[in-house]
Each structure stands twice: as structure tokens, then as C-alpha cells.
Amino acid sequence: MPLVTVHVALNSGDAQLIRSRLEAAGLHPVLKDELASQDLATGGIKVQVPDIEERDARIAIRAKSE
């Protein structure tokens, strides 16, 4: 199952917070490039979910930021 990026964080704290919120919503997030994020040229830490969970993940992220 392919993964899609639903959030890009510039620090580990933000990435972990989003990951926790998605897990609490019953989704299956993974973090990509967490160790490489010390170099901002990598584009930050990517929070990814299986493609079939993309819509629900985006809704969960948006609901928490409102």
C-alpha cells in the first residue's frame, strides 16, 4: 500500500504531535526523514499515511488546527 504525505513538519515535536493525533483518530501514520530533518534542505519531516487513509488524515489534521 503506497504512503502519501499529509503534513510536513520542520521539527520533531510538531511531527510527533501530528503523528499522535492521527494515531488517536485510528489511522496508521509513519514519519519519514525524521533523522535527516536536522538539515532543512531535506524538506522537513514528512508525516505519511497509507493512501486509503489520506482523506481521513487531512480531516483530522484540519480539525485539530481550527
Image (cartoon, grey):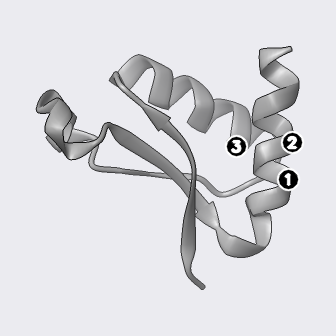
Q: Position of residue 2 (x, y in %)?
A: 56, 80
The three-letter code of the residue at mark 1 reads Asp
Secondary structure category for the residue under label 3:
helix
Given residues 58 and 50, the one toward you in this image is 58
In this rendering, the answer to whether 63 lies above or below 19 is above
Whichever of labels 3 and 1 marks the residue nearer the N terminus, that label is 3
Q: Work out which quarter of the rendered image holds the N terminus and state it.
A: bottom right
Q: Position of residue 25 (x, y in %)?
A: 83, 42
In this rendering, the answer to whether 8 lies above or below 17 is below
Q: Work out which quarter of the rendered image holds the C terminus and state it.
A: top right
Q: Give me the residue at 47% from left, 30% from top.
A: 15
Answer with left or right where residue 12 lies relative to residue 5.
left
Answer with left or right where residue 2 lies relative to residue 34.
right
Q: Are marks 2 and 1 in contact (CB under 8 Å)?
A: yes
Q: Which mark is residue 23?
A: 3
Say which residue label 1 marks.
Answer: 56
From the image, state whether disc 2 or disc 3 is nearer to you.
Answer: 2
From the image, state whether disc 3 or disc 1 is nearer to you.
Answer: 1
Q: Quadrant of the rendered structure where residue 20 is?
A: top right
Q: Are marks 3 and 1 in contact (CB under 8 Å)?
A: no
Q: Which mark is residue 59?
A: 2
Q: Quadrant of the rendered structure where residue 61 is?
A: top right
In this rendering, the answer to whether 59 lies above or below 50 is above
Whichever of labels 2 and 3 marks the residue nearer the N terminus, that label is 3
